Image (spheres, helix red, strand yellow):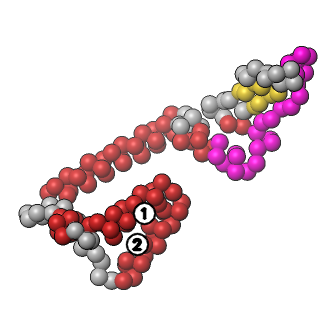
């Protein structure tokens, strides 16, 4: 509930259902009479607003109860498992000499273009990941390729 701001302000009451975004409602009440001036809810939402609300409810595990929570838990455990197994696999196959042991660039130009296209699409779809990719690319071009010890370390 938000209190009126000034003599012409209204009370704003928002209700949210954690389990069902379609039950959300916002009421605007006259501060003197208590009369409902406007009611805004699911029917007034646009398609994008509805999709966002449903996505948030799914992401937070609120939509389908325990099955949704179990799927989210499984996804979380899988990501943790991939991070740990990736380090373990690299550790077992790491190079004996100095350096990070990153794989060499693909010799096939089509593969390189395909990977670049996938990275471009993901970078646009997920802007923070795209910014991270641009930072790494800039560091690679400006520092790593120009400084011999870094170039040897990163392969």
Residue 88 percent across, percent down from the top left: 20, 52
Q: Is residue 45 left or right of residue 115?
A: right
Q: Label 1 neighbourhood size at 10 Å, few (<14), some (14-19), many (20+)?
A: few
The residue under the point 18% across, 70% down is: 148
The residue under the point 47% across, 60% down is: 130
Magenta segment, which residues? 30-53
The residue under the point 76% across, 31% down is: 25
Residue 139 shows in the view: yes
Q: Quadrant of residue 91?
A: bottom left
- For disc 1, the marked residue is 134
Q: Quadrant of residue 119?
A: bottom left
Q: Nearer the viewer, residue 130 or 20?
A: 130
Residue 100 percent across, percent down from the top left: 19, 61
Q: Nearer the viewer, mark 2 or mark 1?
A: 1
Question: The C terminus lies in which quarter of the figure?
Answer: bottom left
Q: Label 2 neighbourhood size at 10 Å, few (<14), some (14-19), many (20+)?
A: few
Q: Is residue 30 left or right of residue 65?
A: right
The question of residue 17 being in magenta is answered with no
Q: Are marks 2 and 1 in contact (CB under 8 Å)?
A: no
Q: Quadrant of residue 28?
A: top right
Q: CA distance from mark 2 to mark 1?
A: 15 Å
The residue under the point 36% across, 43% down is: 77
For residue 114, the mark is none
The question of residue 35 being in magenta is answered with yes
- For disc 2, the marked residue is 115
Mark closest to the chain's N terminus, 2 or 1? 2
How many numbered circles does the render carry? 2
Residue 93 shows in the view: no
Question: The N terminus lies in which quarter of the figure?
Answer: top right
Q: Nearer the viewer, residue 95 or 98?
A: 98
Q: Is residue 68 left or right of residue 52?
A: left
Please determine whether, in this image, residue 89 is positioned above or below residue 4.
Answer: below
């Amino acid at each position: 509930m938000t209190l009126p701001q000034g003599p012409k302000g209204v009370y704003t009451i928002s209700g949210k259902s954690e389990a069902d975004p379609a039950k959300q409602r916002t009421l605007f009440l006259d501060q003197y009479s208590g009369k409902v001036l406007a009611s805004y809810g699911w029917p007034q939402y646009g398609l994008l607003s509805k999709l966002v609300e449903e996505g948030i409810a799914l992401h937070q595990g609120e939509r389908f109860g325990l099955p949704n929570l179990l799927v989210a838990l499984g996804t979380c455990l899988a990501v943790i498992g991939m991070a740990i197994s990736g380090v373990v696999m690299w550790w077992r196959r790491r190079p004996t000499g100095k350096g990070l042991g990153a794989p060499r660039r693909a010799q096939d130009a089509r593969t390189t273009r395909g990977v670049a296209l996938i990275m471009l699409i993901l970078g646009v779809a997920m802007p923070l990941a795209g910014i991270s990719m641009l930072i790494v690319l800039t560091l690679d071009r400006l520092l790593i390729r120009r400084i011999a010890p870094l170039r040897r370390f990163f392969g």
